[in-house]
Amino acid sequence: MSAETSGAERWLAAIVESSDDAIIGVSLQGLVVSWNASAARIFGYSAEEAIGKPIQVLIWPAKEDERDVDLLRRITQGERIDHFETVRRHKNGTTVLVSLSVSPIVDSNGILIGVAKIARDITSRVAMEQSLIAVSDQVRLLTEQEAQARVASLANRRFRELIEGAPDGILQVDGTGTIILSNRTAETLFGYSPDELVGKSVDHLVPETHRAGHAEHRANFAEAGIARPMGMGLDLHARRKDGSEFPVEISLSPVKTEAGIQVVAVIRDVTERRRVEQQVRTLQESYMAELEARQKEAQRLNHLKNEFLASVSHELRTPLHTILGFTDLLSEELEGTLNETQKEFVQHIHHDSEHLLGLINDVLDLSRIESGGLRLHTESLSVREAILDAVRGIKHQADAKSVGMQADNSGDFRVIADPVRLRQILYNLLSNAVKFTAAGGTVSVVAQANGTAVRISVADTGIGMSEEEQAQIFHRFYQVSSSTGGAGLGLAICKQLVEIQGGSISVESELGSGSQFHFELPMA
Amino acid sequence: MVLGENLEGLRQNTNRARKQVLIADDSQSSRDLVRFILKRSGCDVIEAQDGEQALALALEFIPDLFILDLNTPKLDGYSVVFELRKQAPFIQTPIVALSASVAQTDSARIATAGFSAFLTKPIPPASLRKCISQLL
């Protein structure tokens, strides 16, 4: 060996010795050939203890790792292994985690003579890695927990704010009746300073008169466990710190806690509401009283009006009757003849007087019907008799005009109607029929059944009316021709009378041939 | 109040040639009308203003026919006919009812009250004469 070579060798040896990593030379037989200081440090064996010993016995773990076995094979095939992380054993039995680099040693002829292993102790690194992971896990956990806690705290605060800020008083009461939670509103409502209510018995807030039953109610409620308003419909009162009482509405809900079933009560001060309710009631009463008074007054006035109308009508009609009578006498010329002009005068007087009489009758009738002042005395009536009656009443008018009257006596129907009004309707229709029929014509009355009603028809062979006239005929004041007298109210009255008795009225007509008026009333 | 000649001769004379008709109506004009209508019918007309007077004059003159307005004051037509029918001279006497309106014409009630006939105002003079001649 030259000086240079030994210098280079010395450098190499120094490098090997000063390396932090364990550098181990192993013979083909597996015996340790070289062992550096770091090997001693890492594995616990001194050079003397290690050299010449089988490496596997020294530092391989008890349980053979097949990767290590495979390692040998690969090395003998000339492969180089780098950063192979595996487990080795310290002299004292503890586990050492290493990262191995293994390379074949060949002689100058290229023949494999051994294996060089460089082992880096990665235990601490791994440990540190693991503790770093653990720490980061913990940090993550803590961060999560903290985040959750923050969220919970925020939710809690918001919830608290909600409770505190609620417009109604909120109390939570435990099984013994002690208040364990109260909000600001409750404290203000009952006149206590903040937090003064917590810890007190809820009985303090109940008027003395009701305390006895309250405990029982609480127990019952806790058992039933259904959320509900307390004492619905009752007049509940609560008691303030100073002893004064005020009206309240209370809603209760059960709440399950670890300490058992507790009750949350929401309390509303309804003093204002009760006051307003009372005001409304008072106002209502005064309105009702006023309404009643006005109704009475209206009824009184209506009654007065009807009485007035009744008495006035007689006074108004009487003179007209005599006017008509005397004009008739004049026309008869029994007390002296009249010239043509005088006859015409008399006719005018007669005609207008009839007109006036008709007006009075109709106006009074319609007024009474419309004001509801018409009282009906409905009963079961014989239609045949009503018809015969009306025909008898109109006979002299018909005879005077030479108009024939026919009444169909075959049916024997009964209707529910007011006898006076039925007569009025029949008389009105017959009177119209006669009025509009020329001498030689006929007016007939027929009654038939029509389902649950009786249909009475008054037909004439008179002048008839057009479609437009038929459409208007039952309207007030409508007149086919004003020369026939009357105020045009007759048929309007008939319609009203028929309808208030639960019936209906209609007309069929042909201009020039005649008209048929039909009305129906409920069958008895 | 009585009109017509020979007042004394009219009393209690059932076989008289001229018939006596009593009209009871509170309207003077109405009574005049009836009087004029019956002027040439060969009747003497006795006028009463109200129901009470009608009964008094009835007893005094024993008329052959009555024409009673149903609305007379003091005693209405129904009451008068009721009283008349209770008394011997008038059980069969024709009594005509005058009603003022169609609504008032309750023919059933009129018939059962004892009237012999009824007419509704305004009465055509011819109708009244015909009615009277039929009844007398």
Image (cartoon, coloured by chain):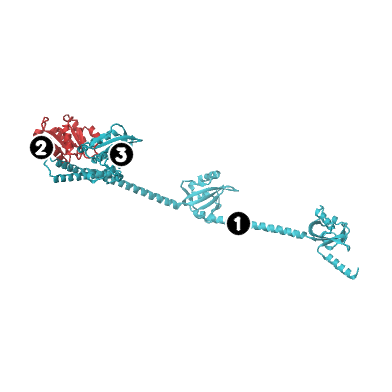
> In terms of image quadrants, where is residue A428?
top left
Query: Which mark is on residue A362?
Result: none
Question: Mark 1 is on which residue type?
Answer: Val
Residue at 58% x, 57% y: name it.
A154
Question: Mark 2 is on which residue type?
Answer: Gly
Depth check: give the residue in front, B116 or B122: B122
Q: Say which of marks 1 and 2 sits in front.
A: 2
A42 lies above or below A219: below
Residue at 23% x, 33% y: name it.
B111
Name the chain letter of the residue that bears numbered label 1: A
Element class at badge 1? helix
Q: Say which of marks 3 and 2 sits in front.
A: 3
Query: Label 2, on which residue?
Result: B4
Distance between the Cα atoms at labels 3 and 1?
Answer: 87 Å
Chain A rendering hue: cyan
Q: Residue furthest top?
A: B88
Q: Position of residue A114 (x, y in %)?
A: 87, 60
Question: Mark 3 is on which residue type?
Answer: His
Chain coloured red here: B
Q: Are marks 1 and 2 in contact (CB under 8 Å)?
A: no
Query: Label 3, on which residue?
Result: A518
> In terms of image quadrants, where is residue A34?
bottom right
Q: Say which of marks 3 and 1 sits in front.
A: 3
Query: Label 1, on which residue?
Result: A151
Q: Position of residue B29 (x, y in %)?
A: 16, 42
Q: Residue furthest right?
A: A1
Depth check: give the residue in front, B8 or A515: A515
